[in-house]
Image (cartoon, grey):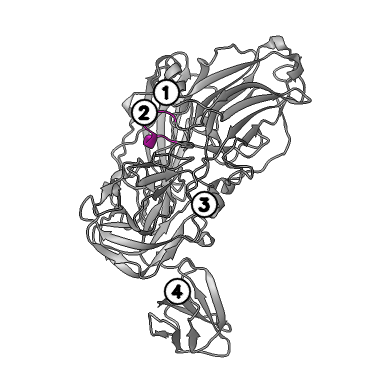
């Protein structure tokens, strides 16, 4: 996106490029989930050949048994159709998910992916022997500049620009020496020249100075932030994806066709047709998809037989269903460019329904593919797992946004609406939203109104709810899953479908999370003038409608059968009167805001001054310290 005009459309990582001068995708200023997935290990370890990592069986920070540095990010989200499931991404974010401290619009050093120490002086297994330059030692890997190919608004990731680069360095015992580098591609020039998105590189290690007992290799990237001055739209950029890193001896220059490896290419798909998550009481067997799309690759130089199956387990690890696709042939991907086409493997059917019985429930779907005869070289990429959750909300997203979404307009008010379809009438009580942290938290404190429209058609109908008070982006109220919960001032009964959303104030850019894993563009509508329009951007918003009483507060459930409370007037303006049927010298009051955070406490008093309180929904808990009995009631401040 970077260096492009603000009126273009951008993905994932730099300037939010605009389309129709209204919708804009922006880069992430940080990625909180990277810090949540940190791993610990030895700062130094000594490894033997062969060295291999295809990042297929873990996410988060690099495996500390193989990698010394923690900046790069292992994921299944930032690159399409890698050699095997999982990649590692080097970009402008550090290991904690924040922009590097040196990040500017000028060229700066981004991530470093450095291996643990690898002994290149000798081999121990199967027999001890000295390694020499004549032993044909090669380091190979695949790389993909972020963004891939195709229209800008369909791409996944931010493509580095000329001037940005990815480099490979080897340690000779005294210093790091650069042995390979690639400049940022110009448009689709890499694909045009090779007719392949992923590029394969082999580096022969022949210099005797590298054959020592403390050898290391490392990848580094250089990037530059977009110089767009609009607050909230500058962030991560210039991504390089790496996969299938392999260092060993006795290899050949072009030996990638010799990898006897059958593997999944993309992560396990959901089994619900429409949603990633939905309330258990809303779930119906008709919500199941008819089949799944599975991508299986054979990296060997000839056809191999594959065996594919999946098992479904409940929260108690009890098997509740299974599917066996049997054996079938899979052609060589390096020779044909084709994946497994056998329908029983590539499009397995779904012939069961989840046995939901509780408000919240989870299931684990384990997919396995095996090379049918002697087995393949790497089993880590032969299994992929999907977790199906049922909770008190609907979600199209998987909770990991790759972009930020916002409306860029000169209008003083604009509107964003997001459609959800219910199976039965229900009570809407809250809306969860994930906002991306931006450079210097430039979107913190921005105001908007929660708004809800009828959903009888593909476009929003009549406005049925609008906040009387402004809501704001407050990162201090972010819950553990990255979302902020906004409670409605009063619950709203929804019959069948609904558009939830916001009224945006002014020309500010909110930077709502945008997830590319589920294309719901037909459910996203926006209005900056008189007419609603449907989004053209492939993905979904990190915005979730929450239903039922369990979504009302984020604190423990409180008894309402103990001493009664009367609060008046409610809504209140300057003073709230409090009447409790049972009080003593040990009675105290606690006040929680709409996110469940304790904001005030003190001894019982029949009145409470509200002059300094922001408008909003609150929950009062009255507790007797001697008996431990609590009772609670909600009130509104206007």
Q: Secondary structure at mark 1?
A: strand
For label 3, count other residues whose C-alpha is less than 10 Å away and answer few (under 14), some (14-19) or many (20+). many
Q: In this figure, which residue is indicated by the disc labeled 4?
A: 618
For label 1, count other residues whose C-alpha is less than 10 Å away and answer few (under 14), some (14-19) or many (20+). many
Q: Is residue 290 magenta?
A: no
Q: Nearer the viewer, residue 410 or 394?
A: 410
Q: Which region shows up in magenta?
A: 148-156
Q: Residue at x 40, y 77 (%)?
A: 638
> Seen in the image, is 522 located left or right of residue 510?
left
Q: Secondary structure at mark 2?
A: helix
For label 2, count other residues whose C-alpha is less than 10 Å away and answer few (under 14), some (14-19) or many (20+). many
Of marks 3 and 2, which one's residue comes earlier in the chain?
2
Q: Residue at x 31, y 27 (%)?
A: 343
Name of the residue lying farthest toward the right: 174
Q: In this figure, which residue is indicated by the disc labeled 2?
A: 345
Q: Are marks 3 and 1 in contact (CB under 8 Å)?
A: no
* Mark 4 vs mark 1, CA separation in Å: 58 Å
Is any atom of residue 375 visible in this view?
no
Name of the residue lying farthest toward the top: 134
Q: In the image, which disc is placed on residue 306?
A: 1
């Amino acid at each position: 996106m970077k260096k492009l005009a603000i009126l273009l459309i951008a993905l994932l990582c730099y300037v939010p490029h605009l389309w129709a001068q209204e919708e804009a995708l922006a880069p992430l200023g940080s990625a909180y989930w990277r810090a949540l997935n940190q791993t610990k290990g030895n700062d130094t370890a000594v490894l033997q050949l062969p060295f291999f990592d295809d990042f297929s069986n873990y996410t988060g920070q690099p495996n500390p048994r193989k990698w010394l540095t923690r900046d790069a990010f292992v994921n299944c989200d930032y690159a399409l159709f890698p050699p095997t499931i999982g990649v590692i991404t080097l970009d402008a974010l550090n290991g904690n998910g924040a922009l590097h401290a040196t990040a500017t619009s000028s060229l700066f050093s981004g991530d470093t992916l450095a291996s643990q120490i690898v002994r290149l002086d000798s081999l121990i297994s199967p027999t001890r022997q000295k390694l020499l330059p004549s032993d044909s030692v090669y380091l190979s890997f695949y790389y993909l500049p972020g963004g891939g190919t195709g229209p800008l608004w369909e791409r996944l990731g931010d493509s580095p620009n000329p001037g940005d680069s990815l480099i490979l360095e080897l340690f000779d015992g005294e210093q790091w020496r650069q042995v390979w580098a690639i400049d940022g591609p110009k448009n689709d020039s890499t694909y045009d020249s090779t007719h392949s998105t992923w590029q394969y590189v082999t580096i022969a290690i022949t210099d005797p100075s590298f054959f020592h007992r403390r050898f290391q290799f490392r990848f580094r990237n250089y990037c530059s932030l977009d110089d767009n001055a609009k607050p909230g739209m500058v962030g991560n950029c210039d991504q390089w994806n790496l996969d299938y890193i392999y260092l060993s001896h006795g290899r050949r220059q072009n030996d990638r066709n010799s990898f006897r490896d059958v593997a999944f290419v993309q992560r396990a798909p959901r089994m619900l047709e429409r949603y990633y998550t939905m309330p258990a009481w809303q779930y119906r067997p008709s919500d199941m998809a008819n089949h799944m799309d599975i991508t299986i690759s054979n990296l060997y130089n000839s056809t191999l037989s594959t065996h594919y199956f999946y098992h479904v387990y409940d929260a108690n690890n009890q098997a509740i269903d299974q599917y066996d696709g049997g054996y079938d042939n899979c052609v060589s991907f390096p020779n044909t460019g084709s994946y497994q086409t056998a329908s029983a493997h590539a499009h397995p059917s779904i012939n069961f329904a989840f046995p939901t019985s509780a408000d919240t429930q989870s299931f684990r779907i384990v997919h396995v593919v095996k090379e049918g005869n002697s087995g393949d070289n790497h089993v880590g990429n032969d299994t992929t797992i999907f977790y199906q959750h049922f909770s008190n909300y609907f979600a199209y997203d998987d909770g990991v946004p790759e972009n930020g979404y916002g409306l860029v307009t000169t209008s003083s008010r604009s509107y964003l609406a997001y459609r959800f379809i219910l199976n039965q009438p229900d009570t809407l009580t809250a809306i969860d939203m994930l906002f991306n942290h931006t450079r210097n938290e430039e979107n913190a404190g921005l105001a908007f109104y929660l708004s809800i429209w009828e959903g009888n058609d593909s476009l929003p109908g009549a406005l049925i709810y609008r906040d009387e008070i402004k809501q704001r982006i407050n990162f201090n109220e972010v819950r553990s899953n990255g979302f902020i919960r906004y409670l409605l001032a009063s619950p709203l009964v929804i019959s069948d479908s609904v558009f939830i959303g916001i009224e945006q104030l002014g020309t500010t850019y909110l930077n709502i999370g945008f997830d590319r894993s589920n294309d719901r563009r037909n459910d996203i509508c926006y209005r900056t003038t008189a007419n609603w329009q449907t989004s053209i951007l492939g993905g979904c918003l990190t915005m979730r409608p929450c239903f039922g009483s369990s979504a009302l507060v984020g604190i423990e459930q409180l008894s309402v059968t103990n001493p009664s409370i009367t609060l008046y007037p409610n809504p209140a303006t300057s003073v709230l009167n409090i009447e409790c049927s049972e009080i003593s010298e040990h009675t105290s009051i606690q006040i929680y805001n709409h996110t469940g955070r304790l904001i005030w406490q003190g001894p019982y008093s029949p009145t409470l001054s509200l002059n300094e309180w922001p408008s909003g929904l609150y929950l009062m808990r009255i507790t007797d310290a001697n008996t431990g009995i609590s009772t609670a009631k909600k009130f509104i401040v206007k």
